[in-house]
Image (cartoon, grey):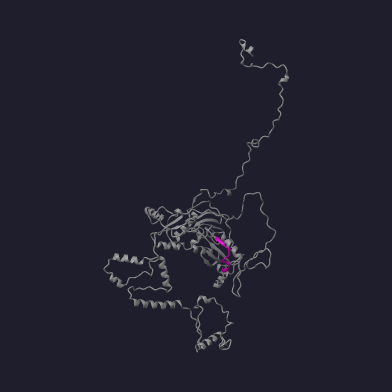
């Protein structure tokens, strides 16, 4: 390499020749095959027919309905909003209702918890929640089920299954009936015919007592008495004559409305009610087979949009007054605290009593759903009545309104000044007299109601004269004591025939109710003959006679 580097005009990094030298032998162009053959894959499916791709199947239009989270809103007015032949959806005094051909009344989702205010909009398209007359459905890959070949025997209240029948549940027979009377059977019977004769007191106790501590019941929650509960109550009546309904939460604010709706829609009769528990009797002549049958709702329809309960400027107030009331309400103590799933039977009365002492009332609702205490506020607005101010901090703030009137203005317990008092106070001005009268009238509403109840039950008396001497006051007290004892210990008199044979009797109309239910079943045991009863033993053989003899001997 040193020799080559020393040679003149030699470039070690010269470029390669532009064309290779010609090859003398053809064997130099052969190349050996690779050790692993290259696999030949089939072309992908996407690239086979790119222009003839199959179109996706079109979804069924019934599955394109907007769901709950969509912001669907449509303003509505009173009247029919959708119709399909005789099947119509309308808005009226009872909110959104559904009319079906042949139905006895308009169907609703909830019969007891529908506000009195008319809705202003709907949150979903107007669509019947019931099954259509014909049921077209998208193909699911399965054929409809075949009809069962086995014939199931049908039993009803008038044709119960025989005793010892295997695989058959118990069916309650109609009743109860007095001795010698039988049930009435018919296809088209009115409510009065199904109920039969009014139940007596001992019959009600006999029917209610087995259900007192039984868990077989219908639970009525925040939605109130819903449409599907109609069929549920009839399924309870199939096995028992009385259905127990337990109400909790929002519906218990107005239990009278719940009881009215239960009797009106089911056709039964409420025979007992304790707090939020109601016992519903089906009727003496009830038959499960001829009961009214209603279609079931397949889903819960979305609640419509109602006007706002809380207004920025409530009726009867200015904007500044409303703001001032809301600021005062933050420091106001609540009159009660509502628990979740509680029974609020006395809430309306408590709010009315609280308005007697304060223009603002607050109710605490910790842990309740916002929709629950808003429904409670809407009920209080109608029942008390009052003006709602806010629902802040899970609390209901109410104002009694401009047109509020006290329930105790015409109270007979209000002291009336006598003529002597007026003569003594003649030198006083009119303003001083009005101030003194207001001080005498102020009292607790609970104490006033207790005094009023005592006066009505003749346990207290009102003295119109205030300046009485001790002797005169004592005479009035003794006189009232005698009259109150006479009123408290007065009973219905039983008049017996006298020695002269005159027969004095009491008419059935004048007989008290506690004796009206007693039948004449004791005629055979007690006869009206004049025969005297013979003593059981000899005279002086009783144990009392022996004691009297010993005492006489000691006294001697």
Q: Residue furthest top?
A: 8
State which quarter of the image contains the N terminus: top right
Report whether 255 appears left or right of 158: left
Residue 486 position, x and y percent, is 44, 78
Report whether 43 appears left or right of 465: right
Report whether 68 appears left or right of 473: right
On whether residue 212 falls in the magenta region, the answer is: yes
- Per the rendered image, the range of residues in magenta is 208-219
Which quadrant of the view contains residue 440? Answer: bottom left
On whether residue 87 falls in the magenta region, the answer is: no
Q: How many marks?
A: 0
Residue 501 visible in this rendered orientation of the protein: no
Residue 255 position, x and y percent, is 50, 63
Residue 186 position, x and y percent, is 60, 68
Residue 396 visible in this rendered orientation of the protein: yes
Q: Nearer the viewer, residue 242 or 477?
A: 477
Q: Residue furthest left?
A: 427
């Amino acid at each position: 390499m040193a020799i080559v580097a020393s040679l003149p005009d030699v470039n070690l990094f010269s470029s390669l020749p532009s064309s290779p030298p010609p090859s003398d032998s053809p064997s130099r162009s052969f190349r050996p095959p690779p050790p692993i053959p290259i696999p030949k894959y089939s072309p992908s499916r996407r690239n086979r027919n790119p222009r003839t791709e199959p179109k996706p199947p079109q979804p069924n239009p019934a599955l394109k309905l907007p769901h709950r989270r969509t912001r669907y809103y449509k303003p509505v007015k009173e009247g029919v909003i959708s119709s399909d032949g005789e099947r119509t959806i309308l808005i009226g005094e009872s909110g959104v209702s559904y009319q079906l051909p042949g139905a006895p009344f308009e169907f609703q989702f909830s019969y007891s918890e529908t506000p009195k205010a008319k809705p202003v909009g709907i949150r979903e398209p107007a669509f019947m929640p019931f099954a259509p007359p014909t049921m077209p459905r998208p193909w699911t890959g399965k054929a409809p089920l075949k009809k069962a070949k086995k014939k199931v025997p049908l039993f009803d209240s008038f044709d119960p299954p025989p005793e010892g029948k295997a695989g058959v549940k118990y069916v309650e027979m109609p009743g109860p009936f007095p001795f010698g009377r039988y049930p009435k059977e018919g296809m088209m019977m009115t409510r009065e015919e199904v109920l039969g004769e009014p139940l007596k007191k001992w019959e009600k106790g006999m029917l209610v007592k087995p259900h007192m501590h039984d868990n077989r019941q219908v639970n009525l929650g925040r939605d109130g008495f819903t449409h599907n509960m109609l069929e549920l109550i009839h399924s309870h009546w199939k096995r028992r004559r009385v259905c127990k309904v337990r109400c909790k939460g929002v519906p218990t604010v107005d239990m009278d409305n719940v009881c009215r709706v239960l009797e009106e829609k089911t056709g039964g009769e409420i025979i007992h009610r304790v707090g939020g528990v109601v016992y519903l009797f089906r009727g003496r002549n009830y038959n499960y087979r001829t009961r009214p049958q209603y279609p079931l709702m397949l889903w819960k329809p979305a609640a419509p949009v109602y006007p706002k309960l809380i207004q920025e400027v409530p009726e009867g107030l200015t904007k500044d007054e409303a703001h001032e009331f809301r600021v005062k309400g933050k420091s106001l103590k609540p009159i009660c605290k509502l628990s979740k799933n509680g029974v609020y039977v006395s809430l309306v009365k408590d709010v009315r009593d609280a308005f007697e002492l304060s223009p603002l009332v607050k109710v605490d609702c910790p842990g309740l759903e916002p929709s629950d205490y808003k429904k409670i506020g809407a009920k209080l607005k109608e029942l008390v009545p009052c003006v709602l101010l806010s629902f802040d901090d899970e609390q209901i703030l109410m104002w009694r309104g401009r047109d509020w009137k006290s329930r105790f203005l015409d109270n007979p317990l209000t002291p009336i000044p006598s003529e002597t008092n007026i003569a003594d106070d003649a030198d006083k001005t009119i303003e001083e007299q009005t101030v003194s009268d207001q001080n005498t009238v102020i009292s607790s509403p609970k104490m006033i109601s207790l005094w009023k109840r005592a006066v009505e039950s003749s346990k207290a008396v009102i003295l119109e004269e205030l300046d009485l001497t001790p002797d005169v006051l004592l005479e009035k007290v003794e006189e009232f004591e005698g009259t109150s004892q006479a009123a408290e210990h007065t009973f219905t008199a039983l008049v017996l025939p006298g020695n002269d044979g005159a027969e004095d009797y009491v008419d059935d109309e004048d007989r008290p109710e506690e004796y009206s239910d007693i039948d004449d079943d004791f005629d055979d045991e007690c006869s009206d003959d004049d025969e005297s009863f013979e003593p059981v033993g000899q005279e002086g053989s009783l144990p009392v006679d022996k004691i009297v003899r010993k005492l006489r001997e000691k006294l001697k």
